[in-house]
Image: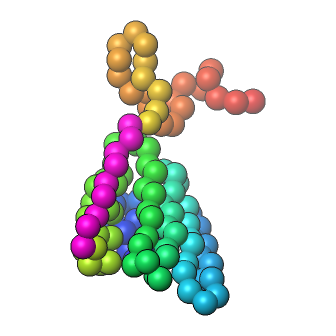
Amino acid sequence: MMVSAAKEARATIVDISFHEFNPFGISGMVIIAESHLSIHTWPEYAYAAVDIFTCGEIIRPEVAARFLIEQFESKSPSIVELKRGILSPLTNERLPHKITDPQLEYV
């Protein structure tokens, strides 16, 4: 479901890693070029915590969140959106998530 959520959000999947705990529970990460999606589950409490971290203007994290809520048939979803990224102090605009000026690239 996490991989499908990343695809629904139009993310570029780079790597996938999940671990199943004994006797139950899963933690996993879908690394995307635009950041990551992670999940930690506690089936004994019917609870899952999901983080969807993205950058750029193409990715649609809200689509991934809605997809997961539907797939998990969540009875009481809670969504908290945190804006991240650097805002330009001069124009109050978001800076691009990729460096486009060759003079600013790391050596």
When the figure is inspected, residue 6 is found, relative to residue 56, above or below; the finding is below
On whether residue 78 falls in the magenta region, the answer is yes
Q: Residue furthest bottom?
A: 23
Magenta stretch, main secondary structure class: loop
**Picture colour scheme:** rainbow
Please, which residue is most extreme toward the front here?
45
* Nearer the observer, 77 or 94: 77
The stretch in magenta equals 75-83
Name the side, left or right, on which 6 lies relative to 107: left
Image quadrant occupied by the C terminus = top right
Report whether 39 appears left or right of 92.
Answer: right
Q: x, y percentage for residue 43? A: 46, 81
Q: Is residue 44 above or below residue 16?
A: below
Q: Quadrant of the N terminus?
A: bottom left
On the image, the x and y values in percent for residue 61 come to 34, 54
* Residue 64 picture location, percent across and down: 33, 63
One can see residue 62 in this view: yes
